[in-house]
Image (cartoon, coloured by chain):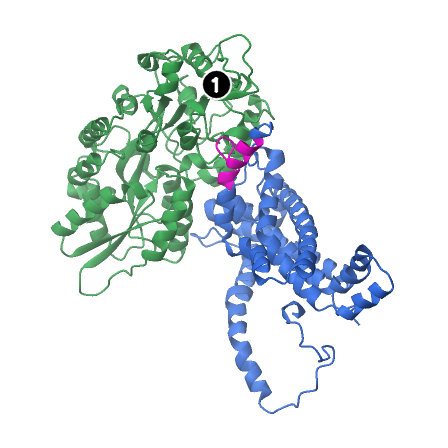
Chain colours: A blue, B green
Amino acid sequence: MTVATPPAPPGTDRRRPPPRPRRRGDLGAAVLFLVPATIGFVVFYLVPAVRGAWFSLTDYAVLAPGSFVGLENYRRLAADPQFWNAMGVTAYYVVINIVVQTLLAIALAVLLQRMTRSILVRGIALLPYFVANVVVALVWYFMLDYQIGVVNVLLGYVGVDAQAFFGDPALAIPTIALINVWRHLGYTALLLFAGLQTISPQVYEAAAIDGASAWRQFRSITLPLLRPVLALVLVVTVTGSFQVFDTVAVTTGGGPVDATRVVYLYIYDLAFAQLDFGYASAISVVLFVVLLVVAIVQLRLLRANESDNA
Amino acid sequence: MTQTDDRRRHRPTRAAALVAAAALALGGCAAAGEGDGPVTLTYWMWDANQLPAYQECASAFEAANPDVRVNIEQYGWEDYWTQLTARMVAESAPDVFVDHTQQFGKYAGFGQILDLEDRVEESGIDLDQYQPGLVDLWRGADGGLYGMPKDWDTVGLYYNADLLAEAGIDPAEMWRLEWNPQDGGSFERLLARLTVDRNGVRGDEPGFDSERVAVYGMGYGEAGGGFGQAQWASFALSTGWTYADRNPWPTRLAYDDPAFIETIGWYRSLIEKGYMPPLAAATSGIGVIESMGSGAYATLVEGAWNARAMSELQGVDIRVAPTPVGPSGQRASVFNGVSDAVYAGTPHPDEAWRWVEYLAGRDCQDAVATHARVFPAIAESSTIAVAAFEELGVDAQAFAVHVEDGTGVQAPVTGSWARIQSVMAPAMDAVLALQRDPSSLAAANDRVNAVLADDS
């Protein structure tokens, strides 16, 4: 992952690391280092994923063994209005969340790089990310309360009517999406900021000599050179965004009128409240495929494996 | 939240529940003792407020049964059922746990709860000592007894005594209220009087602005899905309507009944008239209790389990009266309760039964009664609780009147409740949000009846 690479010390050529002599025993060491992660991957990801795929073909009900039902769960899913509603609601959330978050994060990353060298200021931008999701959601839930929330009190001072941020079907998803933007902005900006650090200052110097404006530099240098990092950040944030759950679970719980019943909440409700594990697994499989396709398309479109930083 | 709010009883605020759950998750990891020493039973409950009372019971029980230790663990309502399900899957569920009418059917159906019928017979417990109807809440579809009654609850009409005085209403009037779905009766006139707009104009005065209301006559926390325990149920049930063709284990639900649809139409008209907040505003808050505390609502239908929380609100004088008399000539309330259930997979069924027997007996229920948190299931212990509540200034008669008059209607018991709510919650939301007509509930009823048919 290139984003985590610290800026190289001056005088070294980052693009061409000196060839290291191959030593014997590399394989043994590699295996040693890979085994823990592999065990974790197999136990916590691979086995559950395969089991989940199998459950999606059964009517497994957690407390009772299921029987094979073929593609019945998938047929049911295609005709389930609550599933399609959940997918639509989730997509709406992802669009608001990702567009706003990415634009603000790019702006914040550039500001962090240009305006300050203070670790403190850079640290403060990251603060919301250190607070647990559920806590963030609850604090905003209090602040946005219709009757006694501080935000509505402030709106009242400037003559704006109180807003039912979580209760109004039209406002609920944007509200939740923006709360999560607030929490993740600093972290996303930090990843992009690390990407910015890899862009050689000489490129900007050359541009400045040619008389390029700051905006022109941003469009013609920063954005193109940031593209691989941006692609990675987008894949990670979009995937995470699709999996929104806790913020919704502790605030609206899916209401009003299913306006915030995101797909993960629907899966959770089906599996753990209705004990309909087979069907819940089928929706999880579909969500997995959707995310896979989205990630591949994103990487393709953004040509993430190529860099203009040459 | 949420779609299924009515199912959480005895629930403190969401934040408090989470904090409590976190605290217990950190501190509450005790291993079950095996081997020669005393048997350790794990006992689960969700209401932190009741913990001290039951700790008292546990200590007394341990003193009388030196071979058994009881380890009480508490999880907030939000996590309780998921945790319980997960532990059942892992075959390590608590030996005894507090159970709810809307959950037990599911667990009994999957064979996760012991049928206590034979043990009750053996030990000669008098089932008539409990408030009438409470034991039957825990009958499985097979007629078995899947829990011992622990306590009961009804709902009451809480009111802000200061706002009542400002409106010039005699508190004694609260006990004489009646309503009907046509013009709302004296109850609706009360709400109109108590509602005040931002200009200080009351709901029954000319020039009242129903769009800009400062104090609503009545609050509510959610649409209530298919249960409406603390919303519309008291009104609908007082028309003579009931949830289903039979209870427990209904085969058809009755949300398409014209009397029900008419009641919901009237209930929602209170929103249109400005006497109740729009659904968006009502569900966009921290909670109804906090809104009562801030003076935003003049009255509120809410459960007995929150009587203490209501009376302890700072800065406001909240009292409680019974829900109004309806077209049937009687009041009505959902009559619900919780039980103690024994996990079918417990390695110590005999010890677990001894603990449940103790919990269901006079000694423990009397002790719980004096804590004035809930009304114990045993009729005579209930009387002690009413007195304990009244000592704290809570007029518990408002809740007990349903038991005395027999106007409590048992909560619907079915194993399909979660699936029913997944249909009824959005359906009722849509009606109260003025998106759909009350008659649309008939179509939702067809869908939940299909669920019942599918599950049976």
B56 horizontally vs A239: left or right: left
Who is closer to the viewer here, A106 or B359?
A106
Residue at (57%, 90%) from the top-left corner?
A: A25
Q: Is residue B20 above or below residue B450?
A: below
Disc 1: which chain? B
Q: Describe the element under mark 1 as helix, strand or loop.
A: helix
x%, y% of residue B436? 60, 25
- Residue B83 location, x and y as percent? 40, 51
- Residue at 17% across, 63% down: B37
Q: Quadrant of the C terminus of chain A?
A: bottom right
Q: Main secondary structure of the magenta part?
A: helix
Please report the bounds of the magenta region as a residue range.
A141-155
In percent of width and height, residue B266 lies at 50, 17
- Which residue occupies 59% across, 27% down? A161
Between A256 and B335, which is closer to the camera in this rendering? A256
Please indicate, yes or no, whether residue A70 appears anywhere in the rendered image: no
Does residue B209 show up? Answer: yes
Q: Residue tagged by mark 1?
A: B263
Apparent side of residue B98 relative to residue A39 in the rendered image (left or right): left
Amino acid type of the residue tagged 1 in the rendering: Thr
* Number of numbered labels in the structure image: 1
The residue under the point 34% across, 37% down is B10
